[in-house]
Structure formats: structure tokens, C-alpha cells
Amino acid sequence: MLPDKDDPRTIAFHRTRSSPAIPPDMQRLVDDISDAAGRVDVFFQREKATRKFLIERIGFAAAQIVGPEPKVEIGRGNLELAKRDIVNAAYASRRKYMWQFTRLVARLSLPLLILGALCLTVASGPVTICGTTFTSPSWLPLVVIALWIPAGGGIGALTEFLLRPDALQYSDIMSFDPGRWDPKARFVIVMIVGYVTAFVLWSGVFSIGFGDHKLEEFTRDKPWLAIVIGFMTGFAFSSVRDRLISLRPKQTST
């Protein structure tokens, strides 16, 4: 997104161009204004009204360095107030995201857990209904695994989010949630990575212990380990992703 003429970065840029030899304190303010606007663009990219409000607040700081008599100290003070507003808005954004993801997990993960449990009950042995005995197909345990991996992944991702530190600082804005995926996209990504992780474990590329069990045993009469695989993927997504990336073939020079 290119900043328009009213964007504080545009104002700061033109101030720099018009006065190449600006004092160091003004240069630092110009850099901090651009940095703050960039943080707002990234963190609030899906919240247009909030983004517009915060960019205007940062603009109050940029306005102080325009004109024949720039007021750097006032501009710095306005920027600090804008940073406070950014942090307060980030708290509100975090609460909104948490409730959105909680509702998504309640609507998807819990039904998948229940459906998987019902399939596992049927798969555990013949079922007699009205005097007729039905034998479950041999592939039904695979359905249980397919249901429980995303179920565990959603719960794991939500747990990781809830366990993040309560205090949110201005310096955390860029690192708090770098991907900025919306809840549905995050759920789908965790599900896909969970399936890939399960496949890699099943193929024996690497082994992960869980108590007295090995996670690769999820296909050997231990389908409940699929929940653990999903949970691990959602809870420690970055670590699992990095482990999978490390398996990528590396090009060697000849």
C-alpha cells in the first residue's frame, strides 16, 4: 500500500527532501514516524477504521516538523501519545481475535472430536442394530485420525494464544503475530501442517516421543495420538514448521 499525500510518512519524507541537512533529533523523529506508520499498516491491515484513526494520530506528530519553524519536541510528544493509542488498539484487536478464534474452535474442533469418538466406537467392534450386526470397514480408523488432527490443531493454536503474555508493549506490535492470519486461514494452515506432520511421522523420517509412546504409533491402534499431533502442531507451530523445513533437500555445489 502506497502512502497518500496525507500519510505521515509522506509528510516526513518531503520534510527530509526539502531539508537534507536536518538536525539529528529531527531525523530520529522522522524515522520513528515512518516506523510507527509501518507498524500500524501491518498490525491493523484488516481493521481499516482503526488504521485510519491511528495514521491520523501519527500525522499530528508529522505536522509539527512541517514549516519554517519545526517543533520537534511537540512532535515527539504527539508521537508518544500516538504510540499509546497504538498499544491500546492492539489490546482491543487481540481480544477481538481471541473471541473469533475461540468461536471457530468451538464450532469446528469440538464437533470433530465428538464425531471422531463416535467413529472410533464403531470401529472398535461389530455393532448390532435391530438384530443385524454391522462390521465397520477397515479404513474407519483413518477417518478418526483425519478428524482428530484438525481438532487437536485448533485447540493447540487457541491454547498457545491464551498463554501469551498479558502485557503488550509497543515493541511487541511487529512480533506479536507476524503472520496476521485471520482465524479461518490459521485453522486451515494448522490443519494442513498437521496432516503433513502426521505423514512425515508415519513415513519414519523422524520420531517424537510422548510419554511412553511414540507419535508415529497413531496408526497402530493408537488413533488418539492424532489429537496429540494436531495439538502439538497448533501449540508449537513455528517449531513444527521449522522442523519440516529442515527436511527440505538442500542443493549442493558440484
Image: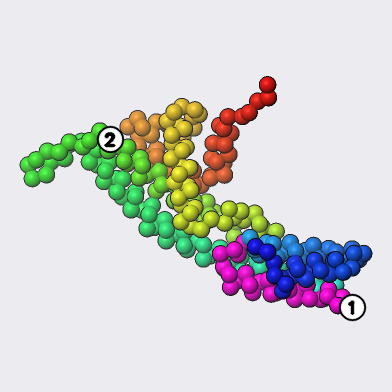
Label 2 – label 1 distance at C-alpha: 78 Å
Q: Residue at x 12, y 41 (%)?
A: 128
Tag 1's secondary structure? loop
User: Is 80 rendered above or below residue 248?
Assistant: below
Can residue 214 be seen here? The reply is no
Above or below for 216 versus 227: above
Which range of residues does the magenta coloring cover?
43-70
- Label number found at residue 68: 1
Whether residue 221 sits left or right of residue 209 in the image: it is left
Q: Say whether residue 196 is left or right of residue 108.
A: right
**Percent coordinates x, y for residue 174 in the rendering:** 66, 57
Q: Is residue 160 above or below residue 97?
A: above
Residue of label 2: 139
Q: Is residue 111 above or below residue 37?
A: above
Q: Secondary structure at mark 2?
A: loop
Mark 1, other Cα within 10 Å: few <14 / some 14–19 / many ≥20? few
**Residue positioned 74% across, 70% down in the render:** 8
Q: Could you tell me the amino acid type at mark 1?
A: Pro
Q: Amino acid at mark 2?
A: Trp
Going from N to C along the chain, the mark reached first, 2 or 1, is 1
Circle nearer the viewer, 2 or 1: 1
Question: Residue at image x 8%, y 45%?
Answer: 130
Please identify the quadrant where the N terminus is shown: bottom right
Question: How far across and how far down the image is residue 18, in percent?
Answer: 87, 69
Q: Which residue is rendered at x = 28% and y = 35% of the image? A: 139
Can see residue 195?
yes
Q: Residue 47's spot in the image, x, y percent?
A: 57, 68
